[in-house]
């Protein structure tokens, strides 16, 4: 699970604009989002952990750490602001301490007991900066210096602030403010010459000098490819050089001798495809021989220094003896080995001072080219494997796992030359071979009691520091009250100088006055106030607060306020200033809702509450809806994509609804009523009178007087006589009927009828489900049904079906509860058959 930590430069220089129209900080934010999109294409990115650190002090500079979610990371990234100094050294130390915070608790570093490449936590730090001068409270720095003091426990056990599985990459933005006329150079992105470049190279990374958006995208794609699980190792040559190749040109012999002698590269640690976790057996030895009497451990370097000998040796591998194989990152060393085209020979590797009586130490593995000559692998074997592997081979093939006395003496002599921390790995290997009893159980691992106690104490302190820092992440930095005036001493007031009179006489009208010297003793305890950005300047009170570009506009505002020609009701303000909001605050509606007064309670609390109208104005609060076990409650008509006057909606007497069990809310389907005897003949005229109230429909239209009797006669004459759907309207005095055509009026009546029936259906359903036998309100609601006779019959039939369905549902529940209650009281026995009692 790789850790990707973004270190964003938030100094004031990141506000400078480019020819693209955006600032450096905006480009940095966009680069982070683009990197995450590119990384998301890889299926292995599911386990990635993202962190965010800026240039503020600890802990305010840690915006997203070990516990923060992806949403918090994105929110803090968008809220970054460029204001401050370029304190990259302190911020880098904060980033490394954040990554190393939990390593002592998990025991990844394994201090004093060898380095395990398969036990790692790969991390990549991506720093995005503008490459300007390094500024801090102490002044301008030419070189990058990391603070030596840190609150991280156990930091003294490693010389460097980073670890061998942590690499630093820097994107240095050099995009100009004016577009360049010259074409961009093709090829790779060159490294930058800023002070952060040496730090990147020390950790195994590199820097990129970005001059355009195309180069930035190219760098991001390269960084995505750099996310590999592995550790960085220093490879150095020891001993004589190998004999040159016969077909090697003379130029290569002269120029290539110094490139591959020392390489600082990564070895890939591939995870197991089954478990997804790297698996290994043997460590890389320490650069010291452990002393059981030593009270402390010597500090180790972050990257192990591995020496390789160019003498050709035979690779040794024995069946049933495990070994580890790691691929080397392409480098001049790998290129030199592959050019020799000798896949059947190897070069042994050593760690200096790892043995007890030898400066170079004993070999713990070898470098060997692959059979296909496409890569170079590092084979990690048991310590001093040229002695151990022949002994184990004789044990398997000659002695058949029954060692002789001579063999045991040779094996004990080997154990004396092996570092004690190899005992655990050797015991596991012997168990895999089938000889678990060769090592005694009481053999010590080489660490003294004081060192073990010290490591346990550091682990506890690291856990406490981890918990403390986690609680502080996310806190905002308190605003400064002011800048205190400090007295440095030795200052002399100008009035107390002996040549004060001569200074006054030397002044003339044309001469420039010398700067006055202040006495700091006179201002002890004073503070210089800081400008409050949230406080708006009172331009009417202080004319010096008016920017130069706004003088004319402000003068016109003052003239309008003086002559009272504006519409503003407040003196000293203007209407455009009252309603002007910065663009950055236009979408901040949450703070506006918090500051708004508490609204009055709703008159109908049963109705679902409508949320704020920011975004989707039709958003409803679904918590207030009633959900039945068998029904799915649906509020309002759900006729999506259909007109209100469609025949499909008029057929069922209601709008289309979602599928549910209740026949009451299935009116939107093509409903076929049951066969009934023919209805009684209609009264004369064939019309069903529907009484509608149209009060307050024509407010503001008082001048449109309508003759009710004349309008009624016109409507009756326009309608088709003898039709079944003919509707007679009882128009009131305030109905503007002359503005509606007959078809539109019929459509409007149908919509009002459907709306009233839907409300009645909801109220009647609630009354049916109430306990008790109170039917007066149900009959009162049934009398208020609107529509034609067929519509009323269909409505009544659905009400009856809903009542019957709900009664069956209650009866089933009662029977189930009764059966469960009786079964709980019946005694059980192994030899008796118990049956449920009759109900």
Image (tube, rainbow, N blue to C red):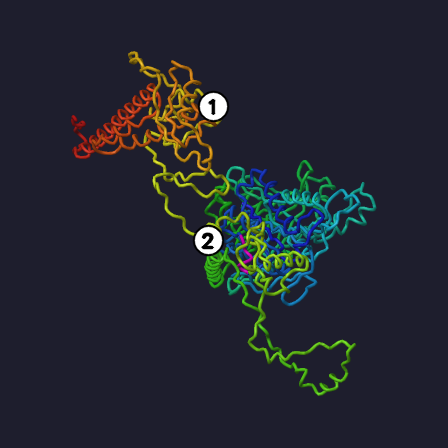
- Residue furthest toward the top? 678
Q: Is residue 609 magenta?
A: no
Q: Secondary structure at mark 2?
A: helix
Nearer mark to the viewer, of 1 and 2: 1
The answer to whether residue 1 shows anywhere in this view is yes
Can residue 356 be seen from the camera position used here? no
- Front residue of 110/727: it is 727
Residue 451 drawn above or below residue 309: below
Q: Residues within 10 Å of mark 2 (few under 14, many from 20)?
A: few
Which numbered disc covers residue 597? none
Please state the extent of the stretch shown in magenta in the rendering: 58-63
Image marks 1 and 2: residues in contact by CB distance under 8 Å: no
Q: Is residue 364 above or below residue 672?
A: below
Q: Earlier in the sequence, mark 1 or mark 2?
A: 2
Quarter where residue 705 is shown: top left
Look at 66% across and 57% down and name the residue there.
Answer: 550
Q: Where is residue 812 shown, x and y percent of the image?
A: 24, 27
Who's the residue at 66% across and 39% down the image?
A: 370
Above/below status of 822 relative to 89: above
Residue at mark 2 = 595
Q: Quadrant of the C terminus?
A: top left
Figure check: 63 above or below 276? below
As measured in the structure, the alpha-carbon distance from the residue carrying label 1 to the one carrying label 2 is 49 Å
Q: How far across and down, in percent of the image, does residue 249 sit?
A: 82, 43
**Residue 547 x %, y %:** 65, 60
What number is the disc on residue 741? 1
Q: Is residue 318 left or right of residue 831?
A: right
Residue pictured at 28% horizontal, 25% vertical: 805
Secondary structure, magenta segment, majority class: loop
């Amino acid at each position: 699970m790789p850790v990707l930590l973004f270190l964003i430069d938030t100094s004031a220089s990141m506000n400078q604009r480019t020819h693209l129209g955006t600032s450096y900080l905006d480009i940095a934010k966009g680069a982070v989002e683009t990197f995450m999109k590119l990384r998301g294409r890889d299926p292995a990115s599911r386990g990635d952990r993202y962190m965010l650190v800026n240039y503020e002090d600890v802990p305010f500079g840690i915006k997203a750490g070990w516990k923060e979610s992806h949403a918090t990371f994105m929110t803090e990234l968008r809220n970054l602001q460029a204001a401050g100094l370029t304190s990259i050294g302190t911020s880098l130390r904060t980033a490394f301490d954040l990554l190393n915070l939990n390593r002592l608790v998990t025991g990844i570093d394994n201090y004093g007991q060898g380095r395990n490449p398969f036990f790692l936590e790969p991390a990549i730090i991506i720093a995005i900066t503008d490459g300007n001068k390094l500024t801090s409270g102490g002044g301008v720095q030419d070189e990058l210096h990391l603070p030596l003091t840190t609150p991280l426990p156990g930091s003294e056990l490693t010389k460097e602030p980073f670890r061998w599985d942590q690499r630093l990459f820097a994107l240095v933005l050099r995009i100009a403010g004016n577009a360049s006329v010259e074409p961009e150079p093709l090829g790779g992105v060159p490294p930058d010459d800023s002070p952060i470049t040496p730090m990147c190279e020390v950790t195994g990374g590199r820097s990129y000098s970005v001059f355009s958006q195309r180069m930035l995208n190219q760098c991001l794609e390269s960084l995505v490819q750099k996310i590999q699980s592995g550790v960085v190792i220093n490879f150095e040559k020891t001993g004589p050089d190998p004999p040159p190749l016969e077909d090697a040109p003379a130029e290569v012999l002269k120029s290539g001798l110094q490139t591959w002698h020392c390489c600082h590269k990564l070895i890939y640690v591939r995870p197991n495809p089954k478990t997804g976790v790297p698996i290994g057996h043997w460590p890389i030895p320490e650069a010291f021989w452990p002393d059981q009497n030593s009270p402390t451990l010597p500090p180790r370097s972050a990257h192990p220094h591995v020496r390789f000998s160019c003498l050709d040796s035979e690779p040794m591998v024995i069946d049933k003896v495990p070994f580890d194989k790691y691929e080397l990152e392409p480098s001049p060393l790998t290129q030199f080995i592959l050019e020799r085209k000798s896949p059947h020979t190897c070069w042994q590797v050593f760690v200096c001072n790892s043995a007890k009586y030898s400066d170079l130490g004993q070999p713990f593995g070898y470098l060997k080219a692959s059979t296909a000559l496409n890569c170079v692998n590092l084979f990690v074997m048991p310590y001093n494997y040229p002695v151990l592997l022949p002994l184990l081979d004789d044990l398997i093939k000659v002695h058949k796992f029954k060692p002789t006395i001579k063999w045991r003496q040779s094996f004990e002599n080997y154990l004396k030359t092996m570092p004690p921390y190899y005992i655990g790995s050797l015991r596991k290997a012997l168990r895999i071979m089938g000889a678990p009893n060769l090592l005694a159980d009481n053999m010590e691992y080489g660490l003294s009691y004081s060192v073990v106690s010290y490591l346990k104490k550091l682990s506890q302190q690291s856990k406490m520091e981890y918990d403390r820092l986690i609680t502080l992440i996310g806190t905002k930095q308190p605003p400064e009250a002011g800048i205190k005036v400090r007295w440095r001493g030795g200052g002399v007031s100008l009035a107390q100088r002996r040549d004060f009179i001569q200074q006054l006489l030397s002044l003339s009208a044309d001469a420039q006055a010398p700067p006055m010297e202040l006495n700091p003793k006179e201002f002890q305890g004073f503070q210089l106030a800081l400008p409050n950005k949230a406080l708006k300047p009172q331009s009417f009170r202080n004319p010096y607060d008016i920017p130069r570009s706004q003088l004319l506009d402000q003068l016109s505002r003052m003239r309008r306020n003086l002559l009272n020609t504006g519409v503003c009701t407040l003196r000293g303000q203007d209407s455009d200033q009252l309603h002007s909001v910065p663009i950055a605050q236009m979408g901040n509606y949450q703070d506006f809702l918090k500051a708004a007064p508490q609204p009055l309670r709703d008159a109908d609390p049963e109705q679902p509450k409508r949320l704020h109208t920011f975004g989707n104005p039709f958003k409803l609060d679904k918590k207030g809806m009633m959900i039945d076990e068998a029904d799915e409650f649906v509020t309002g008509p759900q006729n999506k994509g259909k007109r209100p006057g469609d025949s499909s909606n008029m057929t069922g007497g209601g709008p289309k609804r979602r599928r549910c069990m209740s026949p009451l809310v299935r009116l939107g389907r093509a409903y076929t009523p049951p066969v009934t005897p023919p209805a009684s003949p209609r009264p004369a005229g064939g019309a069903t009178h529907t009484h509608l109230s149209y009060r307050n429909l024509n407010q503001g239209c008082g001048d449109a007087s309508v003759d009710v009797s004349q309008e009624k006669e016109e409507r009756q004459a326009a309608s088709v006589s003898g039709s079944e759907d003919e509707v007679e309207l009882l128009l009131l005095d305030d109905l503007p009927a002359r503005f509606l055509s007959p078809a539109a009026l019929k459509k409007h009546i149908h919509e009002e009828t459907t709306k009233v029936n839907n409300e009645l259906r909801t109220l009647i359903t609630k009354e049916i489900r109430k306990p008790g036998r109170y039917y007066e309100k149900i009959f009162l609601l049934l009398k208020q049904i609107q529509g034609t006779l067929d519509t009323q019959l269909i409505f009544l039939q659905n009400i009856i079906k809903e009542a019957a369905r709900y009664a069956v549902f209650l009866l089933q529940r009662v029977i189930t509860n009764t059966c469960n209650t009786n079964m709980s009281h019946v005694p059980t026995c192994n030899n008796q058959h118990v049956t449920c009692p009759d109900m």
